[in-house]
Amino acid sequence: KLRQARQSHDTGEAMAMATLLPLWKHGRAPELFRFAGGLGVGVRLQVTAAIPHPPPQASALAAVVAAGLPPREPHTRAMTHLASQVSLELPHVVERSMATKAARDPERPKKPASPWIRYLAEFRQQRKDLHHKDVMKVAAGEWKTMQDSKKTQWTQPYETEKANYEKAFKEYAESGKLEAWKRDPAKPKRPLTPFLEFTGEFRQKNAALKVTEATKQASSAWKLLTPDQKAPYEKRFEEATKKYKVEMEEYKSSGKEAAWKEKKGLTAKEELRQKEVEKKQKARELKAARKAKAAAQKAKAKELKAKKREAEAARKAKTKELEAAKKAKEAEMAKAKKLKAEESKAAKAAQANASRKRASMSA
């Protein structure tokens, strides 16, 4: 895209692409999306920002690109002005994905749109004849050269709304809702570890020390304590931990935790953690299924092997039985043949004796 813009001598498009390219290469998607939406290069999204002034270095970058030189990476300050919580609906925008949106208390006061954002929104409506890539460039140029007296139509409403916002936000913070949104007040607090309890006491005794120095000295002092000196801290921690576990079970079973999560919604970090848990659970289930399948296959193979052994044993037994029957039959046949031979021999002998007697009688 940048190469095509340079070849066509489109400095506005080239400036936009040269600015976005480093963000794309370094994977800085949130800044890329927000800045691309401001430049109007075809990326449509919700601009959740308040830009106090147009991005710096724009004219210098355009001159470098027009000269055909490789542009340097733009200063990240141009994107840092786009990090506030203000949401202003501009033309041709859609919601950003939930992965880049943090959970926000609906009762929390919203920051007013800056004079520049107000002017830019009106400029977009009035100059629809301009191409998307030229809107930011032309608007920034006019805003930069505009006299302060002419900017009052955008600065005065902003200052009024800003004062109201600061007052409302102060009341919101002092009411405890700000802290309550960060953490459920009904959720039990995890007890301090023995070392943290000791560190707190050490800081109170040495209030003149800086936090870092106090922590460092407390760590050294803790290491020098004997097991008997650490025992009271460890005992209190053990008792507090048991109490904390009981209170957490009551907190979860009462439905307060579910109600809090439903009210606040999951943050991007919690969604990522939940996806990781689901992924691990799915992996465990898949592993268990594979293990069960392997066990079933092993059992089936073992059963098949046992059946083969039984079949082989039965075949051998049958063969042995047939061989024994054959041998018994052969022995019986041999015995019968022998008996027949003996009977034939006895008959011949009797016949011979009878012949000899008749011969002797004749003589």
Image (cartoon, rainbow, N blue to C red):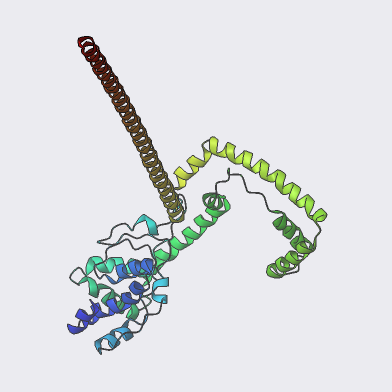
**Measured along the vertical axis of the image, is residue 338 above or below residue 214?**
above
**For this rendering, which residue is in front, 299 or 11?**
299
Tell which residue pokes out farthest to the top in this image.
361
- How many tags in the picture? 0
Report whether 170 appears left or right of 152. right
Q: Which corner quadrant of the image does residue 186 belong to?
A: top right
The reply to whether residue 150 is in sight is no
Q: Quadrant of the N terminus?
A: bottom left
Q: Quadrant of the C terminus?
A: top left
Question: Splitting the image into 4 quarters, where does residue 322 fall?
Answer: top left
Residue at 44% x, 50% y: name it.
Answer: 280
Outermost front residue:
363
* Residue 332 drawn at (x, y percent): 30, 22
Residue 159 position, x and y percent, is 44, 65
Q: Against 75, is 231 above or below? A: above
Q: Camera-side residue: 76 or 280?
A: 280
Q: Nearer the viewer, residue 334 or 45?
A: 334
Residue 74 placed where, x, y %?
Answer: 37, 80
Which residue is located at x 37 percent, y 59 percent? 87
Looking at the image, residue 170 sits to the left or right of residue 6; the answer is right
Can residue 281 be seen from the camera position used here? yes
In the rendered image, residue 268, in percent from the top left (x then y), is placed at: 43, 55
Q: Relative to the observer, which residue lies in front, 279 or 177?
A: 279
Residue located 73% across and 67% down the image: 214
Question: Which residue is at 35% across, 30% downward?
Answer: 317
